[in-house]
Amino acid sequence: MKKTVSNRGLLLAILKKDIRVYSRNMIYLFLTVLSLVFFVAIFWLVPDTIDEDINFAISPPLNELLSEGRETLQAQGVPPQLLEEFDEIDSAFEEEGLALVEFEDEEQLKKAVSGELEVYRTDQGQFLTLDPSSDQKAPDNTTRVNLDIGMSFPLSFLSDAVLGEKPVVTVYADAAVPEEIRGAMQGFIREMVYQLAGHELPVELPAGEMIILGQDRMGDQISMRDRMRPLIAFFILMMETFALASLISNEVLQRTVTALMVTPMRAWHFLLAKTIFGTTLAMGQAVIVLAFVGAFTAANWPLLLVIVLLGSLLFTAVAMLVGSAGKDFIGQLMFSFLFLIPLMIPSFAVLFPGSVAAWVRMLPSYPIVRLLYDVTIHEALWSDSAEYLVYAGLWTLVLYGVGLLVLKRKVNAL
């Protein structure tokens, strides 16, 4: 009497075979373990602190500039009431976010900005400079300060500005300082000269505070470690594409599928088993990594699991496309990079936030990256994520449908 095999029994048999084959592939097994350990270690090694101050150096010291300016202008007969602007200059250098370091001469300032001199801040807010080539060590309870930008003023800067002269100010900036900060500092000097010369700026700003659109992150910047959290989960999902694509490619090339088709197995059994195996493999590793980096909270864990599930299905679909197209290991590797490199692009929008181009938003991986970023960093909930969840679901259905169609045609053609 012929025994009937249930669909569940067929799926379990194929899944056991896939697990056995995967566990015997020492290369991918080693890379899987290595990637888990590596990404978790990298996360905890990345700094979790943010320095929101712009370290700003001037030469000569501010009190010398003010003293020289007052004496010169008083000698020129300038009324004392016109020197009240000097008090505002003193307070301008004490703005929140500016850390002022004063140097006696321009040469010291240049060396400090270029790194030839090391600058340290004490617990009392004082600054010390040390020559790194000497044997002298930094005192205890001090913090190293990296100077972003420095300005060398002529000693007669204030009096020249008031009397209508054109003083020359030299700006020194480290190569890593963004152009917008350099421009802001140059604008700061121009505004100071306008103010001292008694000229109003050619624009008028509305009274009241500046209007911040979106979430104001002043004083609450996101550290590099926090930015790494969604990226790590995304890269783990993406890397499993290689493993599943290799498994599918080997079964197609070695005609394992043809042998299985002799059994009661049908093509849909094979496709469903690969979907379950690939999704479980990618999702399981992503969940492990997210747990180790502290991404799950009591409020976000159901939403985060749904996002990881969508990402796992998406990259399982990509693996089906790659596995059915590759003819050998090199070919499969090339096809993998052909698909994965474009899908990596949205992750850089997370690491370096800013305005995201429209074509980047259209990539299938963008909603997954966006959701991981919003949920793990900004603590977004279901209502905040609905739009991107629908967007990610549509892309997942499209790619999964295409992947199933291509792989099914490949299986039927064997």
Image (cartoon, rainbow, N blue to C red):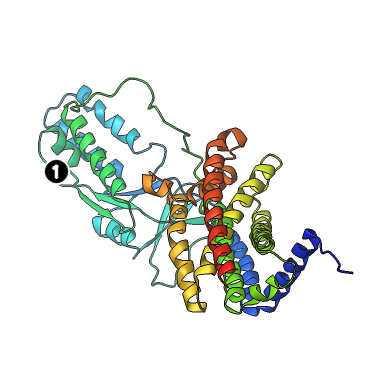
Left or right? Give the position of 233 relative to 209.
Answer: right
**30 to 270, vertically: above or below:** below
Q: In percent of the image, x 52 and y 50: which residue is there?
A: 398
Q: Nearer the viewer, residue 15 or 215?
A: 15
- Quadrant where the image shows the C terminus: bottom right
**15 to 313, vertically: above or below:** below
Residue 363 horizontal/vertical position (percent)? 44, 51
* Quadrant of the rendered image containing residue 263: bottom right
* Quadrant of the rendered image containing residue 145: bottom left
- Quadrant where the image shows the N terminus: bottom right
Outermost residue, top side: 207
Residue 107 horizontal/vertical position (percent)? 25, 60
What type is the residue that disc 1 sits on?
A: Pro
Residue named by callout 1:
167
Residue 50 horizontal/vertical position (percent)? 49, 49
Q: In percent of the image, x 48 and y 51: which residue is there?
A: 364
**80 to 2, vertically: above or below:** above
Asked if residue 3 shows in the view, the reply is yes
* Quadrant of the rendered image containing residue 81: top left
Left or right? Give the position of 363 relative to 18.
Answer: left
Outermost residue, front side: 1
Q: In percent of the image, x 55 and y 58: which residue is there?
A: 405
